[in-house]
Image (cartoon, rainbow, N blue to C red):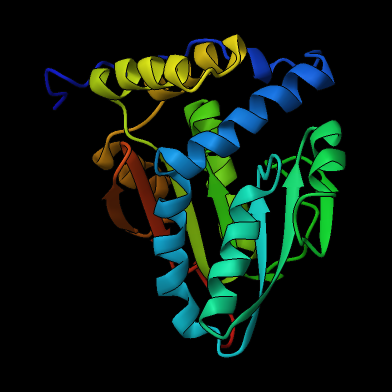
């Protein structure tokens, strides 16, 4: 059931989805995304799930961040884990090579890989934790299921997906905040479209269930964020 403040999910068109966007435009807008993650709850939502996942790792772990952008999320995860005595080695994957070149000087990733999120270039169960933050809403239903299945395939211990909770309040709030924070016009446009492409809690849970056959743990977070996490299907060892 869709509530009054929750619009029907829309596809829309995000400017940065076009691979022909100039690298400087993409980098400028993604720098705004880093600020948004910091100030509007994206980073906090992921770190809460990372904190819970650290308990299964012991002293070290290998993390993949799919759709890493400028690498702010894995960098924050590694710093958070370090404060808790766990050494995380992070690998970032993104489809935009120009972003990865910029990210290389900003994060402590062991490696950045330019690749397709729907066909991850890694063997089964390659990573202890697989992250995917604010990427899933870019995909249609069938490709969304394919993405989730790929995240599940390469994870050993935990998959964490974070995305946006769809709401008129969130869309309007982001627009106002983006003006106050002087975000680029591309960021303002794409941010509102992203919110309207986002999910309700039941929708995101059901998408995971259809993709991999498990019911994930779901949580809301401040800033109209949603997270789902689960132990990968058929995981090996521990």
Q: Give the vertical position of 16 relative to 230 (above or below).
A: above
Q: Is residue 73 left or right of residue 1?
A: right
Quadrant location of residue 97? top right
Can you give x and y, in whole percent of width and height, for residue 37 in the image? 50, 41
In the image, what residue occupies the spot 75% across and 55% down? 107
- The residue lying toward the viewer, choosing from 29 and 207, is 29
Can you give x and y, in whole percent of width and height, for residue 213 in the image? 40, 56
In the image, what residue occupies the spot 82% across and 52% down? 112
Q: In which quarter of the image is the C terminus?
A: bottom right
Quadrant location of residue 25? top right
Residue 113 is at least partly visible in this image: yes
- The residue lying toward the viewer, choosing from 198 and 106, is 106
Q: Give the vertical position of 3 relative to 216 (above or below).
A: above
Can you give x and y, in whole percent of width and height, for residue 11 in the image? 46, 15
Can you give x and y, in whole percent of width and height, for residue 222 in the image? 29, 44
- The residue lying toward the viewer, choosing from 93 and 234, is 93
Q: In which quarter of the image is the N terminus?
A: top left
Q: Give the vertical position of 11 relative to 202 (above or below).
A: above
């Amino acid at each position: 059931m869709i509530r009054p403040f929750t619009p029907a999910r829309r596809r829309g068109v995000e400017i940065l989805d076009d691979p022909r966007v100039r690298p400087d435009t993409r980098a400028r807008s993604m720098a705004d995304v880093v600020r948004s993650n910091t100030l509007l709850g994206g980073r906090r939502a992921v770190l809460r799930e990372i904190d819970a996942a650290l308990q299964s790792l012991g002293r070290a772990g290998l993390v993949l961040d799919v759709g890493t952008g400028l690498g702010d999320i894995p960098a924050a995860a590694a710093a958070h884990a370090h404060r808790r005595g766990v050494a995380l080695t992070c690998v970032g994957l993104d489809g935009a090579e120009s972003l990865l070149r910029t990210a290389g000087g900003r994060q402590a990733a062991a490696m950045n890989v330019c690749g397709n999120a729907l066909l991850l270039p890694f063997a089964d169960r390659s990573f202890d934790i697989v992250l995917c933050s604010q990427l899933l809403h870019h995909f249609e239903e069938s490709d969304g299921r394919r993405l989730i299945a790929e995240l599940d395939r390469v994870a050993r211990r935990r998959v964490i997906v974070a995305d946006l909770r769809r709401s008129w309040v969130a869309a309007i709030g982001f627009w106002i905040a983006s003006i106050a924070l002087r975000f680029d016009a591309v960021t303002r446009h794409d941010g509102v479209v992203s919110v309207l492409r986002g999910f309700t809690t039941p929708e995101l849970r059901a998408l995971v269930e259809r993709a991999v056959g498990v019911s994930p743990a779901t949580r809301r977070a401040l800033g109209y964020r949603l997270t789902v996490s689960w132990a990968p299907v058929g995981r090996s060892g521990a």
